[in-house]
Image: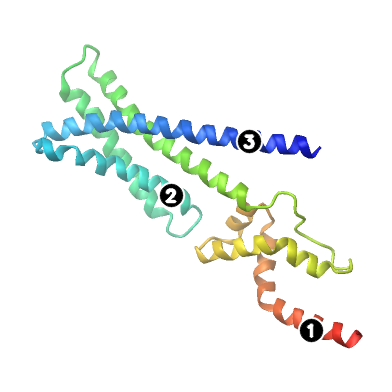
Amino acid sequence: MPAVTRSHVDGVRIAMVTAIIGTVFIAAGAFWLSFTSLSDLARRSGLDPAQAWVWPLIVDGIIVVATVAAVALARTRVAWYPWALLIAGAAISVTANAIHAIVAEATDVPLVLAASVSAVPPLVLLSITHLTSVLMRHQVARSVAPSTETDVVEATIPGAASTELETTAPRRSDASSLRALGWSNSAIAKHLGVHPSTVGRWFREHVVTPAVQANTAREGTSDG
């Protein structure tokens, strides 16, 4: 059974790495197609050829950075800001790519079709960047969250309190770090794979645990 489990974990890890590499290559291709169209449009609009290449970096760069930020700040109070930048950047890039297809006058197909084809790269860049961010975040979550440890230990079992502290300590530490970033209890619970009430209990016990441990130590000394 352990060999099967190890094989399954290795297979999932390989599939995850392959997916991330594939999305990165697709994103690079979409970025290059959009880059060439937007830089040519910038030159046609009067920008100096030596500076025209910067414009697509700004426009499509907003898409990449805002997408990563939107995934990282998901379920926080400031998530609206990267989403606003993402929507604005995507709208500008799609519109500019479509306009370039119309003004280029180098196509034998209807202008609507040419504009639609030119709008594909920035849309793919948007979706594939988001997918890459989600995959990488999921990979980090798998490496952080324990998968086989028991979260709740019955208090009636001898030594249960110390066992629970040992098995949940990594998760409590992660929960504290995520709370410092502004995550809600429900978001932390979903990320760590536990119930929201468990996260709330962790934060409540964080205050009383030292006192409980001190009392336990005194009781152990008196019993001895």
The kind of residue tagged 1 is Asn
Q: Earlier in the sequence, mark 1 or mark 3?
A: 3
Distance from the alpha carbon under mark 2 to that under mark 1: 45 Å
Q: Position of residue 200 (x, y in %)?
A: 66, 66
The kind of residue tagged 3 is Val
Question: Badge 2 is on which residue?
Answer: 70
Q: The N terminus appears in which quarter of the rendering?
A: top right
Distance from the alpha carbon under mark 3 to that under mark 2: 25 Å
Question: Badge 3 is on which residue?
Answer: 12
Q: Earlier in the sequence, mark 3 or mark 2?
A: 3
Q: Position of residue 46 (x, y in %)?
A: 8, 36
- Residue pictured at 37% horizontal, 54% vertical: 81
Question: Badge 1 is on which residue?
Answer: 215
Q: Earlier in the sequence, mark 2 or mark 1?
A: 2
Judged by depth in the image, the label closer to the viewer, 3 or 2, is: 3
Closer to us: 54 or 201? 54
